Amino acid sequence: MGINQVLEIKDLMLNLNGKPIINHLNLEVREGKIQGLLGMNGTGKTTLANLIMGLSYPDGGSIMLDGKDITRDTISQRARKGITLAWQEPAKFEGLSVAEYLRLSRKLSSGEIERLLWMVGLPPAEYLDRDVDASLSGGERKRVELASVLAMRPKLAVLDEVDSGIDVVSLPHIMNGIVEMSKQGSAALLITHSEDAIGIAESVSILCAGKIINSGPPQKMCRWFKTNCQTCAHIGEPVL
Amino acid sequence: MKRFPEMTVVKEYEAMLEAYGAAGGDLKALKSSAVGNLVIHENKVLGVNETRGIKVKTKETETGVNLRLVIEKGAKVKHPVHLCFGVLPKEGLQEIIFKMEAEDDSEVNLVAHCLFPNAINVTHRMKASIKVGDNARVCYRETHYHGESGGVRVIPRAKITVGKGGSWESTLAIIEGCVGVLRYDFEIFGEEKSNSALMVKLFGKKEDDISIVEKIHLDGREARGLAKSRLVLTDNARAMVRGETYGNAPFARGHVDCLEIVNGEGVIAQAIPVVYVTNRLAKVTHEAAIGSIDKKQIQTLMARGLDEEQAVDVIVRGVLK
């Protein structure tokens, strides 16, 4: 493992009903860098995010954080070691305000909370006291989710389609927030469908049928993805 | 009635204040001459403070107190009126016959604290008849402080009429200690353009036995009503929630919303939403959910570094907030 790799996944396997969902997957994320992950629907992106966070456990292979094996760690243990996850469809909480939600992982001053909300394009005066419940739209909830990830200052943030469902005015706020997080030393695994979003990544990997099938610079990988994946019917079977 | 023998009136009053303070009540408000308040221990009225716009009449009976509260026409009562009821000994009976009228155009917030911290065999019964006048607004929040024994039976029953453009909003919360036996039965009749909301928040534990009946009759045009309940049940607690809303007038709108979180092997939870419409232009809806705490909610909080127990605690406190 390279000295500046925060996450190293080796030969990861997950089977469902005898079929591989994650298939001998290898992936590395460097410290403080944004690693993009592109893939069609059903290729295993969210499953991989869940395995990294500890929502489920693999059938084989290993997940290393800072050179230490965390494959069997619980969600809480991983979070305390510095991994967190922004869900594709975040849960909602009755009776828990946005400010309280952002303070879950560590103590924050009012000023810090306001700054985090501005980073994701939410005016604090309108959102601080609102509950993280069904009164928030899907897009608002996603932005609160990202703010809570930023609040944690994680070593690695797994961002599962944080850009989907976000309006074009707010999207730059979110992307800037992720870049800012990376500048402050947090690495990110940015899972997305969007070419615009993936542009902020240093490197991009392409997932097909639970396997990384190509990696490289964002623009090159976007072109490759369009040419090969978006016209490919090989869902469930890697093209390479 | 069997009295707490060693207590004088002064001592009873001090004991009630102490229990009220220990339960998180606002002692300053209870002692302030600017704030309307009333303190009743068992069948004894220990303190009454009327303020501008508020009239209080009390009559002690063998088993409790008959209480009449009037908010005068047009009065906008600035500070919340504090009501403090309780039975401090291990055994006792308190029956409150409560008649209240908020006259037209009046506004008041009532904060009630019911204290039964030592109850082993205590019954608290309230029978209320409440009239909210035209364009009057009443907000009533009742919080109970029970001990851990579960030896208290609470039987509150109320019939409430809400006049044209009037508003009634009430909350019953029993979060601390064991609920014991609860038989809650509130019924509202809402006239034209009235707003009515009934809410209960309960944390059932051990052998608690809970029955909630919330009925709202939307009898006037454009009347609005909400019957909402939030229960968290652990251990062997049992609960039945029946939320009924009747749309009887054009453009009446009502909703029944029940959530019961089950977090114990011996829990029994039941929800019966009833929606009934007798006018084709009325609309009433319901949602009821009973189940364990959402796994995704727990995982989300764990991904922020909380352990599972802390995550459950945050979720439960939020639901009961």
Image (cartoon, coloured by chain):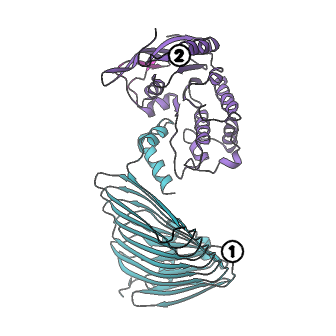
Chain colours: A purple, B cyan
Q: Quadrant of residue B175?
A: bottom left
Q: Report x, y in % for residue B96.
A: 45, 83
Circle 2 is placed at which residue position? A231
Residue at image coords 51%, 80%: B13
Q: Report x, y in % for residue B245.
A: 47, 68
Q: Which residues are magenta?
A: A58-73
Element at label 2: loop
Does residue A63 belong to the magenta stretch? yes
Work out whether residue A74 can be spotted.
Answer: yes
Q: Quadrant of residue B117?
A: bottom left
> Which amino acid type corresponds to the residue marked 1 in the rendered image?
Lys
Residue at image coords 35%, 62%: B239
Q: Report x, y in % for residue B294.
A: 42, 45
Mark 1 vs mark 2: tell me if same chain.
no
> Which amino acid type corresponds to the residue marked 2 in the rendered image?
Thr
> CA–CA distance between discs 1 and 2?
69 Å
Residue reaching furthest to the top: A240
Work out whether residue B15 can be spotted.
Answer: no
Query: Looking at the image, which is closer to me, A223 or A231?
Result: A231
Q: Looking at the image, is B28 positioned above or below residue A26?
A: below
- Cβ atoms under marks 1 and 2 closer than 8 Å: no
Residue B78 is marked as 1
Residue A9 is marked as none
Residue reaching furthest to the left: B266
